[in-house]
Image (cartoon, helix red, strand yellow):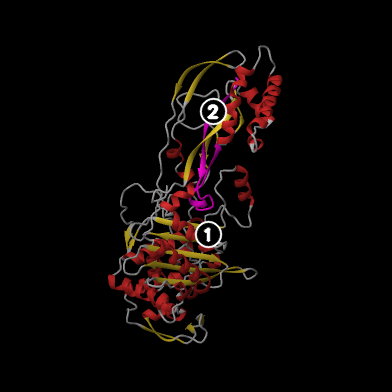
Amino acid sequence: YDRHGVPLNVNRDAMNLCIDLAALREPGETPRRLVEKTVALSNRLAPLLGPGALLTAASPADVARQVIQAPALPVVVWRDLSPSQIARWAVHECAFPAIRLMPETTRCYLLPDKGFHVRGFAATAGPSPGASRDYAYCLPGTAGRCGLEQVCDDRLRGRPGEIVLQVDVCGYRTAVLDCREPVAGEDVVLSLDIRLQCYAEEALAERTGAVVVLDPATGDVLAMASSPAGRLDGSSADYAALAADRARNPLLNRAVGQVYSPGSTFKPLVAVAALISGTVSHNAGFSCAGAFRYGRHRVGCWRQGGHGRLDFTGAIEQSCNCAFCEMASRLGPAPIATTAEAFGLGRRTGIELPGEAAGIVPSPEWKRAAASLPEDERRWWPGDTFNLGLGQGYLCVTPLQMAAACAALANGGRLFRPRLILDGSAPPPVSEIAAAPAALAAVRLGMEAVVDGRRGTGREARVEGVRMAAKTGTAQAGTPARPRTWAWMILYAPVEAPRYAVAMVIEDGASGGSAVAPRLGAMMRRVFNAEGQTAEPWLALRD
C-alpha cells in the first residue's frame, strides 16, 4: 500500500479448471495414453467455456510433464477463468466428474506502469520457504524479482500450506492423510504517495533521467521515478527483454544506482562550507568579468560577458562560476569535502533498495589513493579545487543523495536516512550539519532568489502563490568523441514550512534552467493542487 492506503501490489484470487489424474486414469493405463486423454478432455472444454479460453489453456508438453513427474497433483488445464466462463462450466460440471475448480492466488499490480523500480514484481518461482518437511511435490509459488518485492519477500510470502497424500505404487493419489493451512504474509505500507509518483514519472515524460521527492521532516520517499522503465506484470519473458536492452538499460534505477556530476546544484553546499569556515561572510561581495583567473588557470563563467558585482545572494541566484571559484580558492578542497560528506554525499544512504551507489567526494587523499587513476595523475591540482567548487570533476552523486542534501538545507541542517517502508515510528536524523542557523538561512535566501529573483536561473519553475527555493545545475560529462550533459535541479517548498524536497536530473538536457525547471514547475503545480484531496479517487483505479 502507499502511505494513504491505496493498494499497489496485491493478491487476487483466480479460479482454474483441473483434472484429477487418479479419477481419469483407468487401471493399467500407460502414462502416454493418460496424457492423450487429458489433452483431449481439455480440448473438449474449449467450446463450453467460450471466447478467450484458448488463451489460458495448458500446453500438451505441460500436461505430459506433470503426468510423468507429479501424477498425485491435479493438472491445471485452464487458468484464471472469467466469471462468465465459471458460469458456463457450472452448467456442464456433472458431465465431467474428473474435473474440478481449484482456486489460486496471483499477484496483481495496480497502476502497473508506475513505480516500476521501487515496487518491483514477483514471478513464478520454486516452493515457498518455511515447509516443516521435505516436499515430494511442490506447486510453484512466487518470489520477488526486483525492488521492494525482492527486499520484502520473506515478509510478503507468509508460510505455505501442506497436504500429506497417500499414493499408490504408480504415484497416483489415493487418500489425504493430513494438512496444514497456509499462513498469509504481512502487509507492507510504503512511504510513497502514488499521486506524487504519477506526477514525478509524467514530469520525466520519456526523457532519460530520475526524480526523487522526499519529506524534509522525516526523510520519507514520497516519489522516486527513473526513466526508462518497464511495466509491472510479472512476466519472465518481458523481464528478460528488459534485461537484454543494453542501450536503454530500463532495469537500472537511476535514482539510486546511477551517479552523475551534480554541477551547480552542489554550489549551495560550497556556500555552506565557506560560511562555516569563516572565509566568506553572508555580506561578502564578488566581481565577475566573465572568467576567474588563478595563476595560469582560467575558469570561464557561463555568462561570457560576466555578472559584474554580486552579493552573496546574487552569486547563488545567478550561479556565478567566478564567485564559487573564489570561494573554493579561499577554502581549499578539505572543507568542501568535509561539508559534502556531512550532507551525506560520498556514501550510501542506506535506503531499502538493492543496487545503491555510493558516489565520490574527491579530496587530495582520495586522489592519491585512487587505483583507477594512472600514477602520474594522482596529484591534486588547483584546477581540481575549482572543479570541486563548481560540482564537477571527480565529484559524483546520485539523485537520491542530492534530494537528501536538499532536505537537510530545507529543514535547518538535519540529515535523514531516506526510507521507503513505514513502520509507525518517527525516524531520528542520522546527523546534523554543524552550521550556524544564520549560515543556512543565507544560503536558503540565495536559493529562494533562484526561483523568485529577477535573474534567477530557475525562474521557469515558479508556481503561483507558492514560495520555493531551488538551485539549477548543468554538468559536462562523456568524452570528447561523445560529449554529454547532465541537466539538474534541486528544490524545496514551500519555503516557510518545507513539505517537499526534490532532486531531478535529465541526461543530455540542454541546461537545468531550460530542461528541468519547466518540468519541475509543472510537477509542483500538480502537487500543490492535489493537497487536501482524499485518496478515494485513486482507490477506484484498482478496478
Q: Nearer the viewer, residue 276 or 370?
A: 276
Mark 2 or mark 1, earlier in chain? 2
Q: Residue at x 56, y 54 (%)?
A: 229
Q: Nearer the viewer, mark 2 or mark 1?
A: 2
Q: Nearer the viewer, residue 439 or 108?
A: 108
Q: Quadrant of residue 271?
A: bottom left
Q: Is residue 401 magenta?
A: no
SS of the residue at dot 2? strand
The reply to whether residue 425 is in sight is yes
Residue at far left of view: 437
Q: Is residue 24 above or below residue 300?
A: above
Per the rendered image, the range of residues in magenta is 96-124
Percent across and percent down for residue 422 are 37, 49
Q: Residues within 10 Å of mark 1 (few under 14, many from 20)?
A: few
Q: Residues within 10 Å of mark 2 (few under 14, many from 20)?
A: some
Kindly indicate whether the residue at mark 1 contacts the one at mark 2 (C-beta within 8 angstroms): no
Residue 102 is tagged as 2
Percent across and percent down for residue 364 are 45, 67
The reply to whether residue 327 is in sight is no
Q: Nearer the viewer, residue 5 or 417?
A: 5
SS of the residue at dot 1? loop
Q: How many angstroms separate mark 2 from mark 1 (CA)?
A: 60 Å
Identify the amino acid type marked 1.
Ala
Percent across and percent down for residue 286 are 40, 84
Q: Quadrant of residue 430?
A: bottom left
Residue 125 is tagged as none
Q: Is residue 95 left or right of residue 132?
A: right
Q: Residue at x 34, y 78 (%)?
A: 280
- Which residue matches tag 1? 371
Q: Is residue 355 above or below residue 162?
A: below
